[in-house]
Amino acid sequence: MTVSLFILNGPNLDQLGTREPEVYGTATLDEIMAEVVTYGADRGVTIDHAQSSLEGEMVDHIHRAGRGEAQGIVLNAGAYSHYSYAIRDAVAGAAVPVVETHLSNLAAREEFRHTSVIAPVCLGVVAGFGADSYRIAVDALLHHLGGAS
């Protein structure tokens, strides 16, 4: 089975590597995405990815991926996870499974980060494993789609 996945990263994730390295690590988003793309390719999975700080642009990416451009989405909506009903509704309407993903353990951080409005409409949530969170999310989607992980 050929699987195509889409990874969408939200605001401030383009600042990885320099933004709060004690929380997010020192790898840049480009480095993390390159590793995940290679990880997917080793499993026969095509992974496309994008980053946007614009809520509407993120909604557009989810719509496109949900209309057949991908069989699953790994979504790190960043701070939008906690209040974006537009992204939540896009995920709910996507015809593909979505795994919400975060580098840090949100439950161990500020109280406002403890609630995600997106999580209830996702297949699952992976958080707290740093860059490995993306690989775990890819494996979860592959397992869900019936592919080898």
Image (cartoon, rainbow, N blue to C red):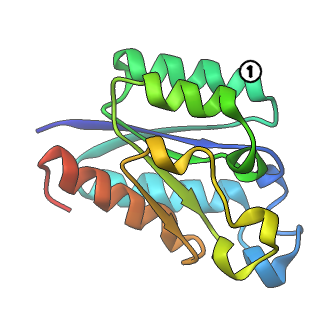
Which residue shows up at 82% across the image and 84% down it? 22
Which residue shows up at 88% across the image and 74% down it? 20
The amino acid on which the numbered mark 1 sits, given as a three-letter code, is Gly
Splitting the image into 4 quarters, where does residue 89 fall? top right
Eyeballing the image, is 118 above or below 55? below
Eyeballing the image, is 31 above or below 48? below
Which residue shows up at 48% across the image and 47% down it? 120
**Left or right of 3, for residue 66:** right
Tell how many labels. 1
Which is more toward the observer, 144 or 123? Answer: 123
Splitting the image into 4 quarters, where does residue 70 fall? top left
Under tag 1, what secondary structure?
A: helix
Which is more toward the observer, 124 or 40? Answer: 124
Q: Position of residue 80 (x, y in %)?
A: 74, 44
Which residue shows up at 49% across the image and 61% down it? 134
Q: Position of residue 34 (x, y in %)?
A: 55, 55
Mark 1 crowdedness (10 Å alpha carbons): few <14, some 14-19, many ≥20:
few
Q: Position of residue 8 (x, y in %)?
A: 59, 40
Q: Position of residue 133 (x, y in %)?
A: 50, 68
Eyeballing the image, is 143 above or below 108? above
Which is more toward the observer, 9 or 95? Answer: 95
Which is more toward the observer, 130 or 48? Answer: 130
Q: Is residue 131 visible?
A: yes
Q: Is residue 104 visible?
A: no
**Quadrant where the C terminus is found in the figure:** bottom left
Q: What residue is pinned by disc 1? A: 56
**Quadrant where the N terminus is found in the figure:** top left
**Left or right of 87, for residue 119:** left
